[in-house]
Image: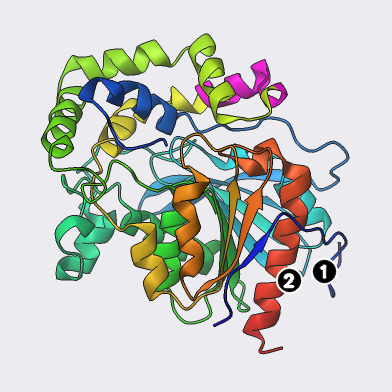
Amino acid sequence: ARPARAMAGAALPGRFPGSTASHQGLLAPLALPALLLLIFLNPASAVATPGARKAVADLTWKWKGFDIRYQRAGEGNDGPSVVLVHGFGGNADHWRQNTPVLADAGLRPYAIDLLGYGYSSKPAPGSFPHACGEVRRGEAVQGTDRHPLGSGYSFHTWADQLLAFLDEVVQDPRGTAFVCNSVGSVAALQAALDGRPGAVRGCFLLDPSLRMLHVRRQSPLQVPLTSALQTVLRETPLGQAFFNQVAKPDTVKAVLKQAYHREERVTDELVECILRPGLEPGAARVFLDFISYSGGPLPEDLLARLDTPVWIGWGEEDPWEPIAQGRAYADHPCVRRFIALPRVGHCPMDEAPELLNPLILEFVQEVFKEGEGA
C-alpha cells in the first residue's frame, strides 16, 4: 500500500467522465456534562451553496420496520455513487452545501440519517433486537467492542444500516464511496470492513471521532466516575432536565461558535436546523444512551484491519478532536492521504465547502480509478 501523503488541500473541479449531468480526556466528573453537550451538538447547515443547480430530494426508506430519512440528488447521473454520513447528533442536512454540488459534477450523492438521528425513527434503546448489529454478530463481538448496555445504538447496527442502504437504495454495481464526519466515520469504517468485496470503494473521514469516552481511552480513576455520571444522566430525571436546558437557541449558538473556527458561518438559520430534529420525540433518550456508549470499535482498530482506501481530512482548528492526536492514523497502510485543513474546525464540509467539495471529487475519482486497477 502507498504511504499516506500529507496535503494542505487540492482542487479538481469539473464533471466526471461519462456523466450525463477534544476534547481531551476527562479531568473531573463535573466536566462531563459540558463535554457531552459539545459532542452532541455537531453543527448542521440549512443553507445550500449558492449557484448549486441540482435539486435535493428528501425521501424515506424502510429498514427493519423503521423509517430512515435520506436525501438524494443527481437523479439521471451515471457518475460514481457517494453516501454522506453525519456525526453524533447530526443528520443529512449537514451535507446541504455538498450534496447538490456533487450532483452538479455528475456524481450520484446520497445523505442519510442514521437510526436514532435526524428525522429517522428513534426507537427506545434495547427495544429492537431484530435490528441490533451486535445481536446479529453474536460472539463475534466481544469485550469492549460491545455496547455496555446492549442498547442497539452501536456502530455495528449503523454499519448494517449503511450496507443495507447500499444494497436496497443506491444499488450501484460499481460500488459506493463513503464520505463521513466525526462518529459517522467509525460507522462507515465498520461497514467497509463488513461489506462484501467491492461494495465500499473508499472512505473519506472528516475529523473522525477519537472516542475519548471509550473505556480504553480513560484512566482507571476516570472509568468509575464517568460511569456513575452516565448512569445518573441516563436513569434519572436529571438527564432529561439537562437536555432541556441545553437545547435552547442561545446555548446552541454558543457551542457552534466553539466548533466553528469561522464564526461567521454560525447563523440563526443554522441554529434552527439543529434544534428542530434534536427535539424530535425520542431524541433525548438516544442522546443519553450514546453518552453511555463507552465501548465499541475504535478508529485505529478498524483502520488496522482494512484494505479499502481511506482518506482523512482534519480541521487544524478542531477543538473537540485535536489533529495532533489524529495524525497517527496516517501510519495505517490503508490511509492514502492525510489532509490538514487550515482555518477549519470540526465539521469542514459545512464550514468550508469551497475547500471540501473539490477534495471529495478528487477522492471519488481516485478510489474508483484505483478499484479498476488503473
Residue 277's disc number: none
Q: Residue 368: horizontal and vertical position, in percent? A: 67, 76
Dot 1 crowding, Cα within 10 Å, few <14, some 14–19, many 20+: many
Q: Is residue 320 above or below residue 156?
A: above
Quarter of the figure with the C terminus: bottom right
Quadrant hosting residue 15:
bottom right
Locate residue 334 relative to residue 237 in the image: left or right: right
| Residue pictured at 73% horizontal, 71% vertical | 365
Q: Which residue is mark 1?
A: 16
Quarter of the figure with the N terminus: bottom right
Q: Give amino acid for label 1.
A: Phe
Q: Residue 6: horizontal and vertical position, in percent? A: 64, 62
Q: Is residue 234 above or below residue 289?
A: above
| Residue pictured at 39% horizontal, 59% vertical | 299
Q: Give amino acid for label 2.
A: Gln
Locate residue 56 relative to residue 13 in the image: left or right: left
Q: Which residues are magenta?
A: 264-275
Residue 365's disc number: 2
Asked whether the viewer can see residue 171, the reply is no
Instruction: Tally the numbered discs.
Output: 2
Residue contact at pointers 1 and 2, CB within 8 angstroms: yes
Q: Is residue 28 magenta?
A: no
Q: Earlier in the sequence, mark 1 or mark 2?
A: 1
Locate residue 37 relative to residue 221 in the image: left or right: right
Cα gap from disc 1 to disc 2, whole angstroms: 8 Å
Q: Residue 371: horizontal and vertical position, in percent? A: 63, 82
Residue at disc 1, secondary structure = loop
Asked whether the viewer can see residue 302, the reply is yes
| Residue pictured at 17% horizontal, 67% vertical | 138
